[in-house]
Amino acid sequence: MSANGALGDVSPDAALAALYKSSRPHVELVPGVSLSAIVNATWLPTDAKSWIPTQPEVDEGQDPPPPPPAFDPAAAEYGVRMQPRPPVMQRRLSKSAPFLRWNELMITIKTLETQLEREKDEKVKEEKTAALESARVAFAETELQLTELKASFAEDPTSLVPWMTTLFDLADAGLTTFDVSGSFFPHAKLHALFASDNTTSYYGEPEAVLGAFKRRYDRERGPGKVQLLTRLVPNIFQDGYSGPSFVEAVVDRIRAAVLPPESQEPLDLVQLFWWDVQEGDAVATLKALQALTEDKLDLSEEGEQVAVLEPRKVRAIGLVDFPSRAVISAIQAGVPVVSLSIPFTLADRSHQASLEVAREYNIKVLARDGLMGGLISEKYLGRPCPSTSGEVDPDLDDVAAAVDLANNYGWVELAAG
């Protein structure tokens, strides 16, 4: 998925410049929330529930079961040297915020010690001695943080699993924005799509996985380095799918999945998907969502002081697959729409009118399916169309969806390159 939008500051993105000598400007979804050049669509396999160990429920009077097993950082798959890369834990630690700070302070201390040996001016020596003492105190604190971080790998059963390492590699490569994703209509099970009673989030499993990743990444690299784009998918064919209480309840569940316990941080982005903009009232749901982008305030009786009763729960609002008329309706209702997620491929340009509206109102576009589910690759040049039966091709997000896209465009033209 690629991200496009009007640019403000045109100075190069510091991370991309360091990694790739790129001159691409830094882009923000909203002030304070970066948007990477490619958005990672987090599409999980069907067994993703088993990815995060959970404690089973215990009946009253029974002894609690042992905790889920932790991973041993000294185990062969994690602790031995893997050519041509160093061990996973060693590589992760070398990029962690405590280690980078530790290394910076070590250089500072060595530099000050060398300067003090040569310094003759007593006043300057006094200043450098004070700076050296301060650096040594900070170094000791950072060394403790690094020790605690090393120990946390054994305490966290998901810290070194392959999917966690993959997500770390993507973020470390500058692809720091992650969007919940997965099979959807018409290629998902109807029970999953329509049986919801609106008490759960449709993307609960990706949210849980991305939440575990974000908490781990924040701990190792420092807070605010990755951005999670979440979605609100009301089942409008059931009761209770709109209104402030429904929207806030779903947002609270998403926050519990992706943020640390007791966190007061808002979600970076909540995107609304609406099954049929001719049915129900999408604008009412968007207005309820908008209310969560603002702090709940309390004005003193004298009217002189304002206190924040509850901080905002959402930073920004986006739309998924909204037609142009519905986008305009949301804007005219005063909803601050910042993004529009739509498919944009060789086979599907049906949202061209929505693109024009996004350009007019400076809405960032998150373009999906650019590689047509994995079909746009050398692997399929001059090859027959993949089959929806038999062995599943692991390089395709969803075989049925990819084949549909190919048939819409024409497989002969696609395979010819």
Image (cartoon, rainbow, N blue to C red):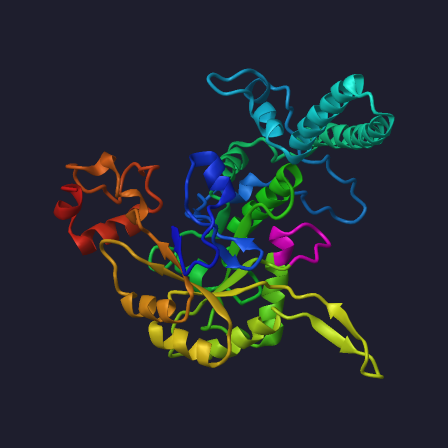
Residue 235 image position (x, y, % from top left) = 47, 69
- Whether residue 2 sits left or right of residue 47 in the image: it is left
Q: State the residue at coordinates (64%, 36%).
A: 220
- Whether residue 303 sits left or right of residue 344 in the image: it is right
Q: State the residue at coordinates (45%, 45%).
A: 44
In the image, the segment drawn in magenta is 255-265
**The C terminus - image quarter:** top left
Q: State the residue at coordinates (20%, 56%).
A: 408
When the figure is inspected, residue 315 is found, relative to residue 220, above or below; the finding is below
Residue 343 image position (x, y, % from top left) = 33, 58
Name the residue nearer the viewer: 120 or 356: 120
The stretch drawn in magenta includes residue 395: no
Is residue 88 in view?
A: yes
Q: What secondary structure characterizes most of the magenta part? A: loop
Name the residue nearer the viewer: 78 or 238: 78
The stretch drawn in magenta includes residue 261: yes
Residue 351 image position (x, y, % from top left) = 30, 65
When the figure is inspected, residue 416 is found, relative to residue 239, above or below; the finding is above
- Whether residue 374 sits left or right of residue 332 in the image: it is left
Is residue 69 in view?
A: no
